[in-house]
Image: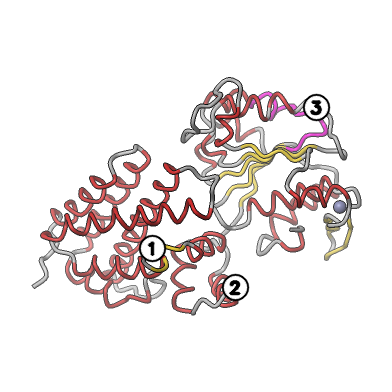
């Protein structure tokens, strides 16, 4: 992919281009924003341009735009995936470090990975071109030790080095890390654009609108959800079934519904792992559990909106009747408590609480908050 192929992130790319044209590039960047809005694609395309041996220059407006040629030796090796001057750093490298050899990757990005795959390598000269680009994935997972170890490199990287941290939540980084990097924010993509893109893949407008809203303007996430193949159909049918069941929910159903949610989350976890081998089983299961909980969360937030008389912009506009049922049976205060409860459930996922307990507690919470039994 070249920079010209990056979709809907013109502002960020223009900032990078202006800095590059003026030889005022920062040596360390944070590409911040939600998953799936183009941070990784932009970082890769930018790296490919920096490493290209035959950079192309074009004037767009008053700003010169540089791009990779796509043909030179560097570009071909880059696309092949083994460019010696493009180094990706991620938490799954942990078992391949000397210090933590063979140990399973954990939730955080440990110092062993940062030291051995970044700090120890920054001094090496580029092999093919003028620069070396390091791309750190999930920088929000850098623990305090890793960040402290990185500080010196972020402050005074060798001239040939560019370090890009991909980060969904920059507020989780230490102020000392933030102050040494230039922060570029990647915004959400407009709903119409996502819906049109998904339509090109044969997704109907109703489903596409749901995914655009559920994924909060992240085309990449929407595409990922749609691509997941579950044992029992697609993710969209999982969500419609979940909302239908929540609308009908009564206390006596809590255990059954919790078991159903656990099974669906397991199925979803396997589907996530099937499309991305790099993601371990634990991470896939966590993502799946959070995904199912988020579907419920969106339904309750929609119900709160309906209760407040706002019926535009519902995530579940496709199941407005079910949402209305949830809204009719509960006061806005109770719905607000559910939303808070779901937040707690999502934290439990990260704390590795047993999945059945998470879903049961959540449903019993709902029931305890006074849900009216279905007559
Ligand atoms: Zn090239």
Residue 145: horizontal and vertical position, in percent? 54, 23
Label 2, on which residue?
197
Q: In the image, is residue 363 above or below residue 283? A: below
> Does the residue tagged 2 have its C-beta within 8 Å of any atom of ligand 1?
no
Under tag 1, what secondary structure? loop
Q: Nearer the viewer, mark 2 or mark 1?
A: 1
Q: Pick the residue in front: 191 or 175.
A: 191
Confirm or deny contact between disc 2 and disc 1 (CB under 8 A).
no
Q: Which residues are magenta?
A: 150-162
Which residue is the extreme one toward the top? 99
Confirm or deny contact between disc 3 and disc 2 (CB under 8 A).
no
> Considering only order in the chain, which callout, 1 or 2, is on the residue closer to the N terminus?
2
Residue 263: horizontal and vertical position, in percent? 30, 55
Which residue is the extreme one toward the left? 375
Under tag 2, what secondary structure? helix
Q: Is residue 152 magenta?
A: yes
Residue at 54% x, 74% y: name it: 195
Under tag 3, what secondary structure? loop
Numbered circle sitting on residue 231:
1
Q: Pick the residue in front: 280 or 298.
A: 280
Image quadrant assignment for residue 174: top right
93 relative position to 365: left or right: right
Which residue is the extreme one toward the right? 54
User: How far, Cα to Cα, is label 2 from label 1?
Assistant: 26 Å
Label 3, on which residue?
124
């Amino acid at each position: 992919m070249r920079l010209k192929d990056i979709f809907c992130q013109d502002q960020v790319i223009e900032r990078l281009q202006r800095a590059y044209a003026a030889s005022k590039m920062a040596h360390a960047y944070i590409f911040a924003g939600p998953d799936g809005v183009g941070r990784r694609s932009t970082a890769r395309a930018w790296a490919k341009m920096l490493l290209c041996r035959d950079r192309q220059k074009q004037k767009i407006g008053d700003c010169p735009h540089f791009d990779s040629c796509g043909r030179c030796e560097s570009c071909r090796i880059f696309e092949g995936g083994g460019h010696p001057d493009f180094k990706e750093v991620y938490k799954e490298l942990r078992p391949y470090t000397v210090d933590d050899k063979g140990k399973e990757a954990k939730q955080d990005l440990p110092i062993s990975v940062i030291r051995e795959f970044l700090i120890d390598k920054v001094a090496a000269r580029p092999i093919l071109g003028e620069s070396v680009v390091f791309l750190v994935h999930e920088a929000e997972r850098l623990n305090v030790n890793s960040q402290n170890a990185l500080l010196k490199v972020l402050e005074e990287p060798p001239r040939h080095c560019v370090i890009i941290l991909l980060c969904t939540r920059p507020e989780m980084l230490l102020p000392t890390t933030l102050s040494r990097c230039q922060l570029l924010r990647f915004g959400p993509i407009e709903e119409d654009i996502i819906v049109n893109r998904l339509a090109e893949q044969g997704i109907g407008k109703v489903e596409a609108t749901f995914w655009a809203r559920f994924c909060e303007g992240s085309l990449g996430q929407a595409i990922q959800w749609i691509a997941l193949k579950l044992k029992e159909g697609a993710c969209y049918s999982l969500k419609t079934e979940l909302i239908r069941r929540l609308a009908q929910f009564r206390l006596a159903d809590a255990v059954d519904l919790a078991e159903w949610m656990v099974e669906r989350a397991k199925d979803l976890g396997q589907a996530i792992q099937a499309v991305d081998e790099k993601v371990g089983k634990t991470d896939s299961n966590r993502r799946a559990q959070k995904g199912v909980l988020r579907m419920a969360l969106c339904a309750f937030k929609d119900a709160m909106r309906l209760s407040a008389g706002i019926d535009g912009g519902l995530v579940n506009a496709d199941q407005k009747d079910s949402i209305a049922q949830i809204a009719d049976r509960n006061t806005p205060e109770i719905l607000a408590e559910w939303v808070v409860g779901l937040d707690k459930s999502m934290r439990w996922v990260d704390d590795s609480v047993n999945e059945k307990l998470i879903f049961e507690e959540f449903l019993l919470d709902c029931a305890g908050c006074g849900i009216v039994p279905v007559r």
